[in-house]
Image (cartoon, grey):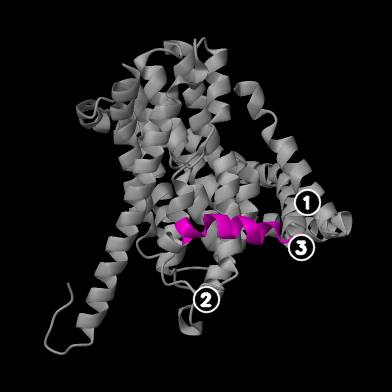
Amino acid sequence: MMKWIFTGLVLLSIVFGACSGHINEVSNAAISECSSAVTLVLKLMGSICLWSGLMKVAQQSKLTDQISRLLSPFTNLIFRGLPKNSPAFSFISMNITANLLGLGNAATPLGIAAMKALAEEQPPEKRHTASSHMISFVVLNTASIQLLPTTIALLRLEYGASNPLDVLPAILASSVVSVVCGLCFVRICSGLEAKSNLQVHQPGRGRI
Amino acid sequence: MISFSSYIIPCVIGFILCYGIVKKVPVFDCFIEGAKEGIQVSLQILPALVGLMTCVGMFKASGALDVLSDFFAPLASIAGIPKEVVPLAMLRPISGSGSLVLFEDLLKSHGANSLVGNVASVMQGSTETTFYTMAVYFSAAKITRTKYTLFCALAADCMSFVMSGLCVRLFMM
């Protein structure tokens, strides 16, 4: 899928750039953006190292297990079918905690660890194929679940909001609905997939 | 409430370290060991980011977003989203820094208490940078077949855009 996004965006930008006369800017962006990715990673490296280090401490002190147990009612519901003793659960729980607290830079290394642990659960022949658990996890991360949107509140304060956190109920309601819908879509898609796989193995029946 | 938020990061760091001390963990050695893994993680996500940021940067520069925004504006108005916010909806899934700049512009030009400001705030707050998350997570786990991930993630994003217009009307008017 990533290859289609990559190629598609490049082709679209050539077409739109040529039509709107912005092809010069497109060319400049190609030259400069690749190095700004390096700058971004260097900038992120500090906080990724900090949070990876702190997580190691939290793991050794069994703090992660405590949090994992605390969140297990939710994680067991979302990741139904994942072995209960999977190490992925503790990474997933820590990632959710970091997201709820708004620690985006801490959430990234934890999310990567969780994805690697989920990949380990895959059978060897499907090692490079996303499982429905991985997809649920990615969807959980692409829909924001931050409890206190601090960046937004600070910007609102700066631009004259009388009460910068008055948007909080609306943000939370919108987040919850989109997360729940996203997870339901994953359920539906994986259900459809399982069904079509079944039918492929039955002779005389087409694929839906 | 906002000053309270400045306590979150220092307190989380302090809590993790104290908990480690209480449980007799060699806190600093352990931290170093974990931080070392952090270097690997950052280097691992670099190739995916170079690819993603290059194509997203080209796409933003091409002016395609304006065309797409004009196209979706009538649809968005049905959901109660002002047309000024539509470019934010287009940019939010593909670029985190870009959407933050655009969000700030909207607050600056329309004011934080306006309908535009409120809808933009909810939109900015209720979704994440979908493409970045997908690229980083899947490349780190070496997953090449991502199946229906993009569809589900974008569907969830669409849902939150629609909800942002609705929720502002429900909760703030």
State the extent of the magenta-drawn residues as a range.
A60-75
Hey, what amino acid is under mark 3? Answer: Gln
Question: Residue tagged by mark 2?
Answer: A121
Question: Residue B19, labelled with which disc?
Answer: 1
Residue A74 inside the magenta-drawn segment: yes
Give residue A116's quadrant in the image. bottom right
Badge 1: chain ID: B
Gap in Å between the C-alphas at discs 2 and 1?
30 Å
| Badge 1 and badge 3 in a common chain | no
Above or below for A79 versus A22: below
Query: Disc 1 on helix, strand or loop?
Result: helix
Identified at 52% across, 76% down, the residue is A121
Residue A30 inside the magenta-drawn segment: no
Image x and y of residue B19, in percent: 78, 51
Does residue B158 appear in the picture of this structure?
yes
User: Label 1 neighbourhood size at 10 Å, few (<14), some (14-19), many (20+)?
Assistant: some
